[in-house]
Amino acid sequence: MKSTLLTRIGILAVAQQRNGGTLPYTLSMIETLRRLPVDAYGLTIYTTVGNRNYDRLGLPVVELASTPNRAIDGLLQRDPFEAVDKVIAPVYATLLLATRRPFAFTLHDLQEKHFPEHFSLITRGWRHATNWLLTARAKQIICESSYVKTDIVRYFDVPADRIAVIPAPPVLSLSHAKLDAASGSALRAKFNLPDVYSLYPAQFWPHKNHLRLIEAFAKVANCFPKCGLVLTGQERLEYAKVMQRAHKLNIAERIFHVGHVDQTELAALYHGATIVAVPTLFESISLPIYEAFSLGIAVCASNVVALPEQVGAAGLLFNPLSPDDIAESMIRLLRSPDLRRQLIERGKDRIATLTADAYGQSLSRILDKL
């Protein structure tokens, strides 16, 4: 029986805009925890100094000092979570190593084991050591797909019963964004967007596979000269290479980079898109796929890692190493309104089971196990 005493929960939320999908994942977890019975939990957000992403969520926020070398944060700090009973972290963080409180954390993926070339030797070593320490000490580990759970068991010898596969729904503010024709028109005017475009919201990390998407889109543009490709993400990492490739292929004028956008603008970008293409090489799950399902946009995506498990029959799958295969899927969707409508309905059915209430019940069970 659950205690009637208020359980004080600390949420370690350190993700920022530059961290890609871990920020909306963190916001989704916080939104869901806020929906749990108020007489069961008292919630406090812990974040790093200067991180303003959590100021307006209606919860107390405590800023934690961070050392210049974050790898030793957990060794140098006194217990930063003394004021709470349990801790949950939407991402892995060395600050958890400083606490004696029972904690759960989300391990999103072990990409460095599969694509070591995307990481320096030092980063690979740091990630392995940090995850080894955290998985050994965590009472519960959360991941978003069976694929990642298998990896955690394989590389860190964690008992399977300490790992919970819990995919997170899209951020509620995305689906609840108030949009009308005027706001859609304003967004198109702001970014000079075409009437028909494919959307890929992602940071320019190598594994997001933008370069092959650009090569594929060159073939798409030959069939659909008025179609555009809309990209989000900050101008760093692979961005310069991506734009150089677009200029070389003479399609730069068809690429629309909108940078970082807020949830309202992101929702408008989805609503204006004809399709969403996700050519990523590695994901635990792809948040843009769930967002597209939720907002009613047809999807084509990579056939790797956990994505076939996520997409099922609700989207087209392609080989992300083949620009020809990527282009073929995009062209099929752009050519067939009937196919898009069919996949949109399947996507809505698939996302219908991924509700905030179901997610909240899963998180509540995790907290009870701490």
Image (spheres, rainbow, N blue to C red):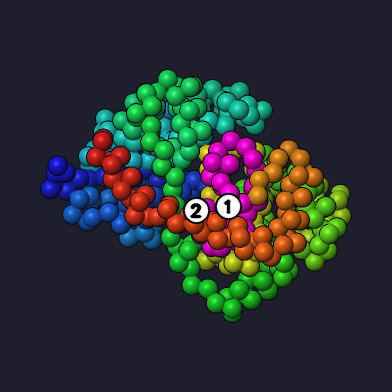
In this view, the residue in front, 25 or 341, is 341
Q: Residues within 10 Å of mark 2 (few under 14, many from 20)?
A: some
Residue range highlighted in magenta: 290-315
Q: Label 2's element?
A: helix
Q: Which quadrant of the figure has residue 59?
A: bottom left
Q: Quadrant of the N terminus?
A: top left
Q: CA distance from mark 2 to mark 1?
A: 7 Å
Which residue is the extreme one toward the bottom?
182
Q: State the residue position of label 1.
A: 314
Residue 165 versus residue 344 in the image, above or below: above
Under circle 1, the secondary element is loop
Q: Position of residue 147 (x, y in %)?
A: 51, 33
- Residue lying at 86% horizontally and 49% vertically, measured from the top left: 248
Q: Is 70 placed left or right of 329 in the picture?
A: left
Does the magenta-highlighted stretch encompass residue 296?
yes
Residue 272 within the segment the image draws in magenta: no
Residue type (three-letter) at the residue carrying disc 2? Arg
Q: Position of residue 197 (x, y in %)?
A: 71, 63
Quadrant where the image shows the C terminus: top left
Q: Which mark is residue 117?
A: none
Residue 22, visible in the rendered structure = yes
Can see residue 14? no
Which residue is at 58% across, 52% downward?
A: 314
Rendered residue at 20%/50% (across/down): 40
119 or 213: nearer the viewer = 213
Would you say the residues marked 2 and 1 are in contact, meaning their CB atoms lie under 8 Å apart? Answer: yes
Find residue 139 and report its image quarter: top left
Q: Amino acid at mark 1?
A: Ala
Image position, residue 279 (x, y; %): 67, 45
**Residue at the extreme top of the image, as rendered:** 157
User: Residue at label 2?
Assistant: 350
